[in-house]
Amino acid sequence: MIRPALMGLLALLLAPVPTEAGPPRRIVSFNLCSDQLVLLLARRERIASVSYLAADPAMSALADQARGLHLNHRQAEEILALDPDLVLTSTFTDRATTALLARLGRRVVALPPVTSLAETRAQILDVADLLGEPARGRAMVAELDAALAAVPPPAPPRARAVLFQANGWTEGPATLAGDLLRHAGLDNLAVSYGIDAYGRLPLETVLLAAPDLVVSGTMPGNAPSLGQALLDHPALRTALPDRRRVRVPEALWTCGLPQTADAVALLARARDRLR
Amino acid sequence: MSRLLADRLTFLRGGRRLLDEVSATFGPGGLTGLIGPNGAGKTTLMRCLAGLVRPQQGQVRLDGRALADWPAQVRARQLAYLPQADTVHWRLSVADLVMLGRLPHRQGWNGPGPADRAAVEEALAATDCTGLAARAVDTLSGGERARVLLARALAGQPATLLADEPTAGLDPYHQLEVMERLRSLAQSGTTVLVVLHDLSAAVRFCDRLVLLDRGRVVAAGDPGEVTAAPNLRTVFRIEAARGQLPEGPYLLPRRRVLD
Amino acid sequence: MSDRALGAGLVLLLALLFSGSLLLGPATPALAFLQGLLADPDGPLRLILVEIRLPRALLGAMTGASLGLAGAALQGYLRNPLAEPGIVGVSASAAFGAVLAFYSGLATLLPLAMPVSGILGAMLGVLLVQALAGTATLGLILAGVAVSSFASALTSLALNLSPNPFAATEITFWLMGSLADRSFDHVWLALPFTVTGWLCLLTTGRALDALSLDEDAAASLGFDLARLRLVLLAGVALAVGAATAVTGVVGFVGLVVPHLLRPLVGHRPARLLPLSALGGACLMLASDLLVRLVTPGQELKLGVVTALIGTPFFFFLVLRAARTAP
């Protein structure tokens, strides 16, 4: 169901038919999520450039692999200078850059952000096909499935969790993080407030709902922000002991990757600690 | 009894000598007028005498003690200063404005007491302002304003009053009124020094005059002698007609002296 | 109306608004909240009351009082009804100071760095404005615009340069202010500086009264104007700097409150000080209640509300100043 839509989008953004046959050999990616898929699936010598974010361990699960590669700053000029035969990005960001590159005749593929593990599998396979590495794609999906299968199933009673992010943003079942909660056997509190994808929950509401688990993202390096300071609000600390508050490294769930299964495992462990 | 002494005051600003070794004594027993042409240093001298600026050389002594050694609040009870063309920045009522004169007498966080209110009433009465007490300052005419500001200076019941052109902008009636009031104040024991541009008022009401020119005291003493023709010619560059009326002497500028 | 009656009225209003701040919130309707609290005094409602709403109400009252008081004091000192911490750029420079301390990570190591840095920023702002402006209305507004814009630009720059991707989205907090989800940590951080600032400002009353006259007349009444300047600048910097460091820039409170109260106290600057503090606390709490009631869930920023209330006053005062200018 997702794949036809995705393929439609790919077709839309495909630039004039490539003259050369065979897999792309000068791949440029300038979005964190496409960066990581390229790093996972493409042969290293075919990667012309990924964005600087891919090398930032705070955001990227594959920062080590990105080191040593050319890092771009998401500017059309520097990307053109690399003379890529395939440009990968996301439909979510840098629309102007994407459109400009396509108009200048480059083959640009924009990947939609994934909102579930099922979409993650499909996208890995799609991109693997695109890069001419279908076998690698299947291996990655198998890796993801194996990691998910290793997560212990939940025992009743079911626990209620809430995703509580910077500035009080929460996520419903229709997002990747929401899907991860479901895979970890946790009920999502946002559903009771009619939130399907993204919405805000006041701190008061979260406290009053008394969830079993409050799930937030975390970044290494600790660059401060007010939004994240909220996650350390004394009321939250008082109401919920440490074991009922869990932090998921942002790099694990910002994009859909085989590593995203680690986030499910982490949530499952937090779930089991509740007993 | 209060005696104010200027001892060889020299005041420099931007390389200019605004006051040059000015010495003078001001005491009770009569109204003293300070006269001189524009830029002679009259206001600078007043500000030195009031302790607002410090001369680079010389000192001002109040009752034998250097002015700078007086605690500011104690000095303020002794010595009141009425600046030239004093502005009032808020729409205070006349009573509240005059009450400002009582500030040096108030202590701690308390509001004004009965003594303060009595002094304000007295000052209002003395300047013919009792009927204005409830009015807002910005509704007053220029003359009313000048009288109210004088009342403000009197409300502190100072032993010494320094008034810089208190009659500027007043109609003749109120000019006479303010001058009479200052003279009777001086006669009742207050030391009053008043800057005047109106030479006629100076000879008419003052018991003593100090003539200032380019920062120096040119003459001091009897008003008739200080305003003698040579002084008027060299300092003010005018010739004047003078005479005697039943109420006192008068002086009327007649013509400019051309070089 | 006597000053005492006016003061009592404001205290009553403050108590009402404070209670409202404690009772109204997104969690439950006010009555249900009260009932729930009485039924289960140790439940989550108590936590919400004590850890979320109480610090919010206290911070609102504290910072509102600081802004009202600082506005009245600045107006008295500069003898200009348009002087106000927000308009003259003191708030913006305080925010810049706090932003530097917070996003550099200094405040994580040493929480006091945040109010202290805010206070230093505020002080710099006051000095800059005073050096640029004098007391003329036009000069004051122009200097305020210059200092404000510069400080806001530096704030935005600092936030954009922060390695944290959320930081850039927090510009609105610093430029428009908010009391949302503040905690007792913030109350304790701001309180000592705020109270010191208040004490400084409240002692300036008589000197400000004297300054209704010219500076010479005020000095001749026994007031040391150099000392007044020092105490007043310190008081404004302490009160506004500490407030801004924990709530961001909330404008116009210091303009509206003294303006409304001035005719009621016979235009006397000293009387205006304590009453403006009370009035500022009231206006801040009322604005914060409005923020919570009008757009629950996705809160409007507090500074937006105070600006909407305050700008008509500002326009009016500017018009009047323009008309009476020589």
Image (cartoon, coloured by chain):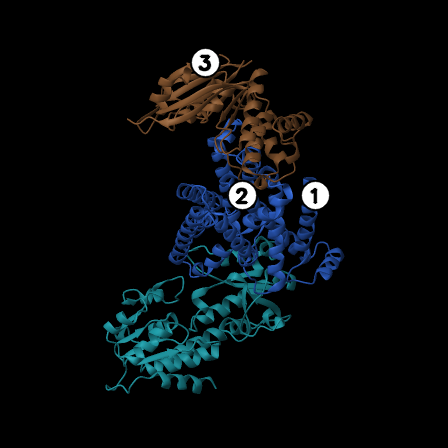
SS under mark 3: loop
- Is the residue under label 3 in contact with that under label 2 (CB below 8 Å)? no
Q: Where is the N terminus of chain C found, in terms of image quarters?
A: top right
Same chain for the residues under marks 2 and 3 in the image: no
Q: Colour of chain A?
A: cyan
Q: CA distance from mark 2 to mark 3?
A: 54 Å
Q: Image height check: is A105 above or below C114?
A: below
Subunit of label 2: C
The amino acid type found where label 2 is placed reads Ala
Q: Chain of mark 3?
A: B
Q: Which mark is residue B255?
A: none
Q: Position of residue B59 (x, y in %)?
A: 41, 17
Q: Are marks 2 and 1 on the same chain?
A: yes
Q: What residue is rendered at 70% in x and 60% in y? A: C30
Task: Tell me the CA gap for discs 1 and 3.
Answer: 55 Å
Classify 10 Å Cα crowding around label 3: few (below 14), some (14-19), many (20 and above). some
Tell me the colour chain B is drawn in.
brown
Residue that label 3 marks: B222
The picture's colour for chain C is: blue
- Give residue C1's mark: 1
